[in-house]
Amino acid sequence: MPEQLFFTIEVILNGLMAGVLYSLVALGFVLIYKASGIFNYAQGVMALFAAMTLVGIMEGRIPFAHLINAILGTKIHHFGWHVNAVLALILTMGVMLLLAWLVQKVIFKHLVNQEGIILFMATIGLAYFLEGVGDLMWGGDIKMLDVGIPQGLNLWIDETTYNMFDYGFFIDNLDIYATVIAAILVFVLVGFSQYTKQGRAMRAVADDHQAALSVGVSLNFIWIMVWTLAGFVALVAGIVWGTKSGVQFSLSLIALKALPVLMLGGFTSIPGAIVGGLIIGVGEKLFEFAVGPLIGGATENWFAYVLALLFLVFRPQGLFGEKIIERV
Amino acid sequence: MENSETQVPPLLELNNIEVIYNHVILVLRGVSLVVPKGGIVALLGGNGAGKTTTLKSISNLLHSERGEVTKGYISYRGVEIQGSDPSEMVKSGVIQVMEGRHCFEHLTVEENLLTGAYTRKDGKGSIEADLDMVYNYFPRLKDRRKSQAGYTSGGEQQMCALGRALMSKPETILLDEPSMGLAPQLVEQIFEIVKSINENEGVTFLLAEQNTNVALRYAHYGYILESGRVVMDGEAAELRENPDVKEFYLGMSEEGRKSFRDVRSYRRRKRWLS
């Protein structure tokens, strides 16, 4: 019996760790949605693009090599150098900043005061554009990403638990790192939005664009800032997911997994994104473990969405979403 | 007042401005007005007369609503300002308090006030001092400083919006419809505070109001707008005594108060030149 119990605990722990990964993606959505009311369909592709750029820079690939070769008939692919992970990370952050600036300048500057659905459509366009540009820039092959995060079974936990309970817990090192990274990210983001001048301005913009404009907040600046932050979060998500399963197109589909997380946690809450992710992660794993064998398995594919559906019916603003303040 | 107008160039001047929304909707057709430094100027008129548009053309919040000044010019301290960024206007001392208060609902009252100081770069100390100053004018806000602005009453929100504007250390406040949705007693209180801010801090006010009665009692000078034109202007005291204003805006005539059934349209009887 204790064997069963330990196994359940292990499932829960692994669920928590998987949930952290979902939360990382959901965070990017929340940031942009909160400050600009835009539901950013492109968040997943941004994670993919960030991870591709990071790999590309680290491996010293020449951007748009295929395009250049096709036009000029050359056969260049690599600069022939390798860039240190930290430096590549900083350069990628620069690229994400540039991307944020371009997105604001080219798209959303012209769509101020438009309906939410129009902004949403624009982000769909952005998603496909970015996907294409990513492939064109760095090639469509599956890339390995290794920034030095260790992977595989954590021996120390395995041994300690084995000695204590006669049962070794299987915990992946990458998951531990991801959890720590996510925790730091959330602390930084919450601190930023609650206690700094720009963070306060960001929340003000989220509440009322016009009023923020009237007190002299530059919407342009705030939105570039928010897209940059979302880009950084996408980069972190891209690194963790990319390390886990390689940088490839399917990386952009993790955005779909973030949707139920958002419905659970609420579209406007940073802690909500985290808690929502954890609940989905644990729920998914536990459900598969307990009920899966009875109904033929593969419940992980749909469990999150059904849970989100229930939430939509009974608590549409999510667990931590801002209540819509209505004065009577 | 007349002396200062002729000697010193006015603080704010609108010269024959025309505003078009969405490239097709003509809202202002040649509005000219002058606001002297330290004055309280009232902009009066009914719904759709163009009061709000006039204020927004000065603060240039027009742009985000797809409106633009197509003719005439606006000058502030002698410099033409039409088309400049709203945040530049706030930095140069002109801030608008929008109609319907527009507080940041999910921010606390104090955070609302602090966002007012967004463009300031003169250090934490003086911002703290101004926060105290605002709490001095609006003791209610001090009691509610930790509650979310969305949950405060209408009067408190108006105070919050006005206080937020004060936090930017403005030279001129464009106040849009401060009386909207407030009880008469509160309206009186708000205008009393506007008056004391004007006297003690030397802040110039240009206020748009539908409540002609109250506005003319507190303002020094008034302009009456109708369908995008200035149809009448004068010293507030004069306007109050003007028989047309009495009849059409204050609801009084020689025979005393009239039934609404007998009220005729203002424009049908008289045409004014802008």
Image (tube, helix red, strand yellow):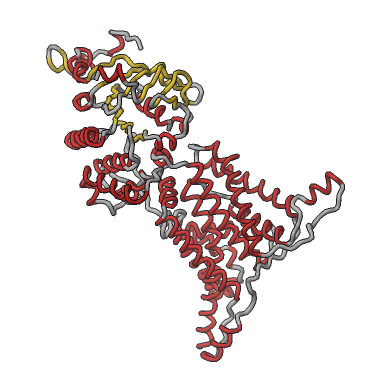
Which of the 4 image quarters holds residue A294? bottom right
Instruction: Where is residue B110? Give x, y as percent.
Output: 31, 50
At a point 54% along the width and 54% down the height, the residue shown is A230
Query: Residue A269 at what x, y percent from top left?
Result: 44, 57
Quarter of the view holding residue A248: bottom right
Considering every residue shown, the one lying at the far front of the view is B7
Q: Is residue A311 above or below residue A224?
A: below
Camera-nearest residue between B77 and B243: B77
Specify whether A90 is left or right of A117.
right
* Farthest-out residue, right: A73
**In this view, B143 is above or below B179:** below
Residue A310 visible, this angle: no
Counting from the top left corner in percent of width and height, residue A261 is at 51, 60
Describe residue A7's horizontal placement relative to residue A247 as left or right.
Answer: left
Q: Nearer the viewer, residue A259 or B35?
A: B35
Q: Residue at x 58, y 61 (%)?
A: A236
Given residues B27 and A167, the one toward you in this image is B27
Q: Residue at x 53, y 70 (%)?
A: A179
